[in-house]
Amino acid sequence: MNDSHDEGAASIRATSLSGDDVERLATDDVAEGVSADRTDAIDTPLPPTLREATGVWMRVAASSFGGPAGQIAVMHRIIVDERRWLDERRFVHALNYCMLLPGPEAQQLATYIGWLLHGVRGGLIAGILFILPGFVAMLVASILYVRYPDVTLVQGILFGLKPAVLAIVLQAAGRLGGRLLARRESVVMAIASFVAMFVFSVPFPIILLIGAIFGTVRLRPVSAEEDAAESDRSHRFTAIDGTRNSGARIATRLTLTLAIGLTLWFAPLGLLAIVFGPDSVFVSQGLFFSRTALITFGGAYSVLTYVGQQSVERFGWLRPGEMLDGLSLGETTPGPLVMVVQFVAFVGAWRMSGELDPILSGTIGATVAVWVTFVPCFLFVFLGARFVERLRRLRSLSGALAGISASVLGVMANLIAWFALHTWFGTVEREGMTGLGILVPDPTTLRPAAVLITLLAVVLTFVARRGLAVTLLSGAGAGIVCRALGWV
């Protein structure tokens, strides 16, 4: 009975494949020495439709808490482990590239994977959906902030999410480490990257550069044939294979992408200058956040300090202390942390609304800030992705990418440590000489509720093996209870 049921299910799945898909699966089976008559070949996950992928990206967006480490962990769990749309090699290859770009790497990774699966449409859908929940949440939080300055209720409701995300991040880091640190040299590079960033505060781009050099020297693949075969298998479900496009065709697409991207980036600013004047707060914010979009390397905090200083001292958009309020909102809403620029722009435009309704003015400012921050992210991904795909099969670069992968794991470990300390303690400071020191929490600011919720999430994730939704909902529910009991 079970055998006939399985054969019937396999037949139904086989009929849903297009002729090209069937031929491709058959070719892959032959190449791998598997008989075409074996039904377990049909059990391979089917390429996702655009509609199916859109639903998954909505799920990823709704779960995008916990900063880049948490967001990358969510994508890895859903895209690689659950859906199996990409294998580990392809996911890490995309992550390596996005880590090199200015801007939020998690959003760019979503855009890149969406592009791999369904071209530009897929990339736009994945990238926009990744931003949308955070944009709406931050807009609502900003409106509540200016109308009701006490936002502790919002922070209390979302208090339980950060400890829950910490468990998910730990799980993802463990899985990535188990798969990518198979060689002793990779382990050494990962540990060195963690120490360099956590203790010495070495800039992120330098860590990646050192990882690439180390990988080129020590982590080249043992077998070129195995490297090529693995590379062939890794693009089974992707719509894009940059290795098969001519240089002239890529150059044409590059020029077109650049022209469209720059037009979308700056044309709205020209329109705002015409409608509100070149000296309006909207134009000033658009130009300022366009510049900051180009220097956001190594995480949002590397640029948000500069944004806060300029917003208070130069532009007068914020008052002292309001930037910290914005960071608190950014830490407790979905989406990239760099969405804090939306809060800065909203409050600044609300404060300098002139004859406009203050809320309308703030909404326009927030939208402009998000637009000029994320349009470059799409542009960078679409400009470079095809070149990166062409480089994927170059054996001479595989060692460099392996070194970068090990470095990224060390950086993720640093993010986990930073995230855990700031989740469990109210005050964390770096102690030591300039450029040297470790993060030390103030024991008197320990948050017992956060520690308990973390333990709950760890049990659900590692012991009970519950899904992502259960862990996040349990954390949110525990946070609400803690707020009601006055523990937050």
Image (cartoon, rainbow, N blue to C red):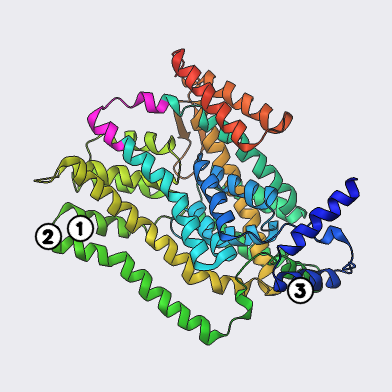
Would you name the residue on which mark 2 appears?
277
Would you name the residue on which mark 3 appears?
23
Query: Residue 485, relative to residue 362: is it above or below?
Result: above
- Mark carried by residue 283: 1
Q: Residue at x 28, y 54 (%)?
A: 368
Q: Kindly report the distance in space between the C-alpha atoms of the residues bearing marks 2 and 1.
A: 8 Å
Q: Amino acid at mark 1?
A: Val
Left or right: where does residue 70 sit relative to residue 285? right
Query: Residue 391, relative to residue 89: is it above or below?
Result: below
Q: What secondary structure prevails in the magenta region?
A: helix
| Dot 2 alpha-carbon crowd within 10 angstroms: few under 14, some 14 to 19, many 20 or more | few
Q: Position of residue 311 (x, y in %)?
A: 24, 45
| Residue at the limit of the structure toward the top, as seen here | 485
Disc number lying in front (3 or 2): 3
Does the magenta-highlighted stretch encompass residue 209?
A: no
Q: Kindly report the distance in space between the C-alpha atoms of the residues bearing marks 3 and 2.
A: 59 Å
Residue range corresponding to the magenta coloring: 142-155
Query: Residue 372, relative to residue 131: is it above or below?
Result: below
| Dot 3 alpha-carbon crowd within 10 angstroms: few under 14, some 14 to 19, many 20 or more | few
| Residue at the limit of the structure toward the left, as seen here | 355
Does the magenta-highlighted stretch encompass residue 148?
A: yes
Looking at the picture, tell me which residue is in the foreground, 304 or 353. Answer: 353
Q: Position of residue 113 (x, y in %)?
A: 57, 60
Q: Residue at x 19, y 46 (%)?
A: 361
Quadrant in the picture for residue 141: top left
